[in-house]
Every structure is written in C-alpha cells, then in structure tokens.
Image (cartoon, rainbow, N blue to C red):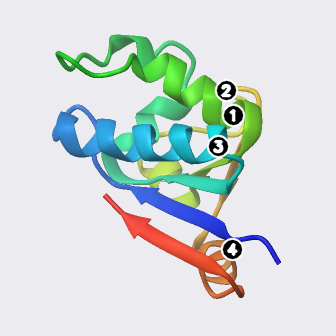
C-alpha cells in the first residue's frame, strides 16, 4: 500500500513563506512519486484562479506557478467549497484540474490508511 500526503495550505500572499513551503513540499512529494492531495483554503484559495500564482513573489523561492503546475501534473488540487464561495469563485473560474470540494471529502482523504497530513 502506498502512502498519500494530504497538504492543507491556508496561507497566501498574507504569509508568503508558509505558503511557499506548502507548495514546495507538495511539488517535491509529487516528483518523488508520492500520491499528493493539495487543498487550497483561506487566502491560498486565490491560487486556484488563472494567473494568480504568477502574482506571488518570495525571494529565493521556486516560482509558485511552476510548483502549482507540478502538483496539478501529478497530484490532486482541491479548492475548499466555503473558501471559494466566500471569494465568489465558481467551478468555471478555476484552473483546469482544480476541483472544488468540502470538509467531508477532506476528512475522507485524511482518514485513509497510510495517510500523512500537513497543515500550513
């Protein structure tokens, strides 16, 4: 049975180091062959929209668009239902490959066997 890594990132431009760490860990895990599920919540919800990751800047960090593309290419990216609703984001607005789902799906993912969960 393979392990799965579920990462919930709550930070965005308001806490750039925490945000970058979450995306970096997710991308490195995908590159390492780990099954990854990255959840965008709180201020990170904005990165589900086209072009928003390109606006993110943090010196000496990997570019957020590249990290997000890596996760979308080999893992799953989910936007929190309530976070999307609070920001007026609908399913037609998000990047291709991003799903919108709620707490029930999150709990189901983190309660699986061989799951490691991180919150940033």
Front of the two marks 4 and 1: 1
Q: Position of residue 8 (x, y in %)?
A: 45, 60
Q: Nearer the viewer, residue 37 or 96?
A: 37
Looking at the image, residue 98 sits to the left or right of residue 66; the answer is right
Horizontal side of residue 61 vs 113, given as left or right: left
In this rendered view, identify the residue nearer to me: 57 or 78. 57
Give me the C-alpha separation between circle 3 and circle 4. 20 Å
Label 1: how many Cα within 10 Å (few below 14, some 14–19, many 20+)? many
First along the sequence among labels 4 and 2 = 2
Locate residue 82, reporting x and y percent: 50, 61
Instruction: Answer with the quarter of the image where residue 87 lies.
Output: top left
Q: Which mark is residue 105?
A: 4
Viewer-nearest of discs 3 and 2: 3
According to the image, label 2 marks what residue? 95
Tag shown at residue 15: none
CA–CA distance between discs 4 and 1?
18 Å
Secondary structure beneath disc 3?
Answer: helix
> Which residue corresponds to mark 1?
72
25 vs 55, nearest the viewer: 25
């Amino acid at each position: 049975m393979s392990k799965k890594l579920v990462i919930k990132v709550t930070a965005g431009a308001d806490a750039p180091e925490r945000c970058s760490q979450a995306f970096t860990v997710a991308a490195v895990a995908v590159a390492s062959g780990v099954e990854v599920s990255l959840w965008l919540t709180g201020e990170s919800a904005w990165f589900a929209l086209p072009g928003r990751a390109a606006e993110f800047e943090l010196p000496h960090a990997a570019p957020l668009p590249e990290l997000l593309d890596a996760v979308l290419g080999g893992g799953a990216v989910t936007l929190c239902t309530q976070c999307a609703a609070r920001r007026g984001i609908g399913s037609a607005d998000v990047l291709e490959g991003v799903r919108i789902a709620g707490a029930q799906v999150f709990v189901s993912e983190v309660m699986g066997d061989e799951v490691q969960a991180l919150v940033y």
